[in-house]
């Protein structure tokens, strides 16, 4: 089993083309899973999410670690 990740935008006609590498044999069975990431609706929502991040302990720990590494 092999996983190949491709990120594409949904077009107006709602069709997505999948590019299969040349080394994959013809008639091979492939399973396709579509995951939709909803983008933030507005600038205010983005700012709200950034403010929430400042209360996230894991995020703050990561920031401290990065800051120590640069010192």
Image (cartoon, rainbow, N blue to C red):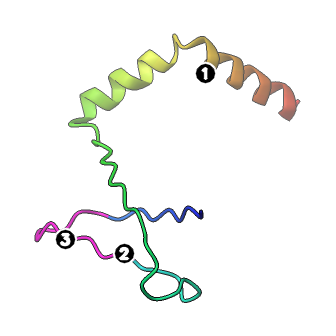
Q: Is mark 2 on a helix, strand or loop?
A: loop
Q: Is mark 3 on a helix, strand or loop?
A: loop
Magenta range is 9-18
Q: How far apart are marks 2 and 1 (CA)?
A: 35 Å
Instruction: Please name the residue that numbered disc 1 is placed on.
Output: 59
Residue 26, image quadrant: bottom left
Please give left or right for residue 44 compared with residue 56 in the image.
left
Residue 62, placed above or below residue 28: above
Instruction: Please name the residue that numbered disc 2 is placed on.
Output: 18
Residue 40 on image: x %, y %: 28, 37
Residue 68 on image: x %, y %: 84, 25
Q: Distance between the residues labelled 3 and 2?
A: 10 Å
Identify the residue shown where x is 19% and y is 68%. 11
Residue 1, placed above or below residue 25: above
Identify the residue shown where x is 35% and y is 26%. 47
Is 65 a magenta residue? no
Dot in front, 2 or 1? 2
Tell me, for residue 35, which label it has, or none: none
């Amino acid at each position: 089993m092999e996983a190949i990740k491709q990120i594409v935008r949904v077009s107006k006609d709602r069709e997505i083309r999948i590019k299969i590498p040349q080394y994959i044999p013809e008639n091979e069975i492939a399973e396709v899973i579509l995951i939709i990431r909803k983008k933030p609706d507005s600038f205010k929502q983005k700012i709200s999410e950034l403010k929430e991040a400042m209360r996230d302990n894991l995020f703050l720990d990561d920031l401290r670690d990065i800051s120590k590494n640069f010192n």
